């Protein structure tokens, strides 16, 4: 769990103690919850099958969070074609996720 997320979580849930498990990997959090129980903010694409099967449920009244997605690569990368394919896939995510794609060394000003 990143610092920014921790601040947002504390701001939105001031009366809830800090999480027992902190991870930046949604799959680890999902596996933990499926085995031990609990709650987490996880990508809908990750939990959708578990919601449909009834293994998980969305907490009533919970806010949906949008998190940015960053793609960074070297402009002389030998994988440029694959990177651009990923960019196309990201733009199709529903709901659309904020993302930033920047070549390393590119002047952004």
Image (cartoon, rainbow, N blue to C red):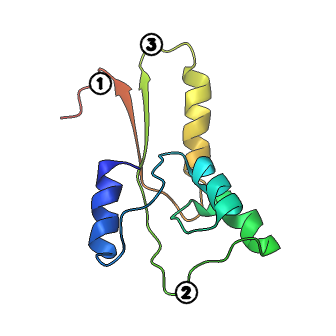
CB under 8 Å between discs 1 and 2: no
Q: Nearer the viewer, residue 55 or 71?
A: 55
Point out which mark residue 106 bears: 1
According to the image, label 2 marks what residue? Answer: 60
Q: Mark 1 vs mark 2: which is more N-terminal?
A: 2
> Where is residue 18, by image quadrant?
bottom left
In front of the other: label 1 or label 2? 2
Whole-Å distance between the Cαs marked 3 and 1?
11 Å
Q: Residue at x 63, y 61 (%)?
A: 33
Q: Is residue 95 above or below residue 54?
A: above
Question: Which residue is drawn at the image coordinates 48% and 47% (left, top)?
Answer: 23
Q: CA distance from mark 3 to mark 2?
A: 47 Å
Q: Please state if 66 lies on the left or on the right of 47 as rendered.
A: left
Where's residue 76, x and y in %?
A: 44, 13
Helix, strand or loop at mark 1: loop
Instruction: Tell me the distance, in whole angstroms, between the alpha carbons under discs 1 and 2.
Output: 44 Å
SS for dot 2:
loop
Label 3: few (<14), some (14–19) or many (≥20) C-alpha neighbours in 10 Å: few
Q: Quadrant of residue 7?
A: bottom left
From the image, tell me which residue sits under label 3: 76
Q: Residues within 10 Å of mark 2 (few under 14, many from 20)?
A: few
Farthest residue to the left: give it: 109
> What kind of element bears circle 3?
loop
**Placement of 83 over or under 27, stated as above or below:** above
Give me the disc on residue 47: none
Report the residue that reaches farthest toward the bottom: 61
């Amino acid at each position: 769990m990143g610092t920014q997320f921790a601040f947002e979580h504390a701001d939105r849930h001031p009366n809830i103690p800090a999480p027992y498990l902190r991870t930046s990997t949604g799959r680890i959090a999902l596996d933990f919850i499926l085995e031990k129980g609990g709650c987490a903010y996880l990508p809908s694409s990750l939990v959708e099958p578990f919601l449909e099967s009834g293994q998980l449920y969305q907490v009533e009244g919970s806010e949906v969070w949008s998190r940015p997605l960053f793609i960074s690569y070297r402009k002389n990368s030998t994988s440029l074609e694959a990177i651009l394919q990923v960019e196309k896939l990201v733009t199709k995510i529903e709901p659309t996720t904020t993302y930033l794609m920047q070549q390393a060394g590119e002047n952004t000003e």
